[in-house]
Image (spheres, rainbow, N blue to C red):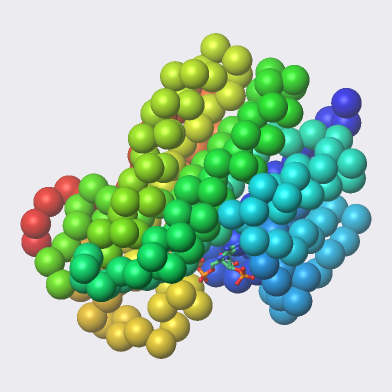
Amino acid sequence: MPTTKTAIVTGASQGIGAGLVGRFLEEGYNVVGTSRSVTKSTNLTASSRLALVDGDIGDPKTAQRISDTAIERFGRIDVLVNNAGIFVPKPFTEYTSEDFNTLVSTIVGGFFYITQNAVRQMLQQQSGHIVNISTTLVDQPMAGAPCALQLLTKGSLHSVTRALAIEYAAKGIRINTIAPGVVNTPMHENDDHEMLGKLHPIHRLAEVSEIVDAVFYLNGATFVTGEILHIDGGAHAGRW
Ligand SMILES: NC(=O)c1ccc[n+]([C@@H]2O[C@H](COP(=O)([O-])OP(=O)(O)OC[C@H]3O[C@@H](n4cnc5c(N)ncnc54)[C@H](OP(=O)(O)O)[C@@H]3O)[C@@H](O)[C@H]2O)c1
């Protein structure tokens, strides 16, 4: 088996995902970056160390193409970052069945299929690390920012993080989750950053590099699994 480590990053075309791809490449990893239109991303260029796979992450066929690409091109899967996501905030009664299907497919399906494939490979290697990106709102919902369906789906990542940490700890596979506050990415490019900054006790948005640093902290933290790491300027800690 090759020795160079391989990372898969979902939602790689922009924002946190593109930042992660850049850092994994800098750190010497081979990378598979994926999103619905990652091959058209101006942030990433395919290379001998970066494979790009287009597809909806909620579709099991996309997950299969991603893991097949990782194995065929690079021979192993060491890290999976489940980062692809959308944000659909609404009062609870205004969510439609289309919103429900889209969020469940993207967040829950987007976690499920690719993580199954990655774990199968990691079991053969007897090592691996999975990091999910959720939101601190799962643990600290806010008046004025209703998004219950978002939290129904993202919250499931917190539960499954603990479940899989226990299921696979003895097999050398760790799983952790990062729960960010509002991050300065294209997701919020048209929003009022001053107002969003006030949603954290540290009155600003997180930068992509701060989420990337947290992923790399967890990646090197060999005794940490089942952890929900809040990168939210203190929002989860209480009221302010
Ligand atoms: N920004 C924040 O304030 C914030 C806060 C808390 C949590 N998060 C979470 O952090 C993650 C990254 O967010 P971001 O701010 O970097 O968002 P972003 O800039 O909007 O990027 C989202 C990424 O997900 C991909 N994506 C969306 N739906 C997809 C689908 N069905 N299949 C495959 N890829 C899909 C998008 O690419 P394509 O359009 O090419 O598919 C894009 O690469 C998300 O899970 C988000 O929920 C963000």
| Residue furthest front as drawn | 97
Q: Could you tell me which residue is drawn at 89 percent across and 41 percent down?
A: 72
Q: Is residue 210 above or below residue 159?
A: below
- 10, 205: nearer the viewer: 10
| Residue furthest top as drawn | 170
Relative to 114, 174 lies left or right: left
Q: Could you tell me which residue is drawn at 71 percent across and 75 percent down?
A: 41
Q: Is residue 151 visible?
A: yes
- 13, 220: nearer the viewer: 13
Relative to 134, 41 lies left or right: right
Give the quadrant of the C terminus.
bottom left
Instruction: Determine which quarter of the picture holds residue 239.
Output: bottom left
Q: Is residue 51 above or below residue 139?
A: below
Give the x, y percent position of residue 4: 82, 37
Instruction: Determine which quarter of the picture holds residue 232.
Output: bottom left
Q: Is residue 124 above or below residue 101?
A: above
Give the x, y percent position of residue 171: 60, 15
Give the x, y percent position of residue 195: 23, 80
Give the quadrant of the N terminus.
top right
Q: Could you tell me which residue is drawn at 64 percent across and 61 percent down?
A: 56
Q: Is residue 92 above or below residue 27?
A: below
Instruction: Determine which quarter of the picture holds residue 166.
Output: top left
Q: Is residue 214 visible?
A: no
Q: Could you tell me which residue is drawn at 43 percent across and 68 percent down?
A: 98
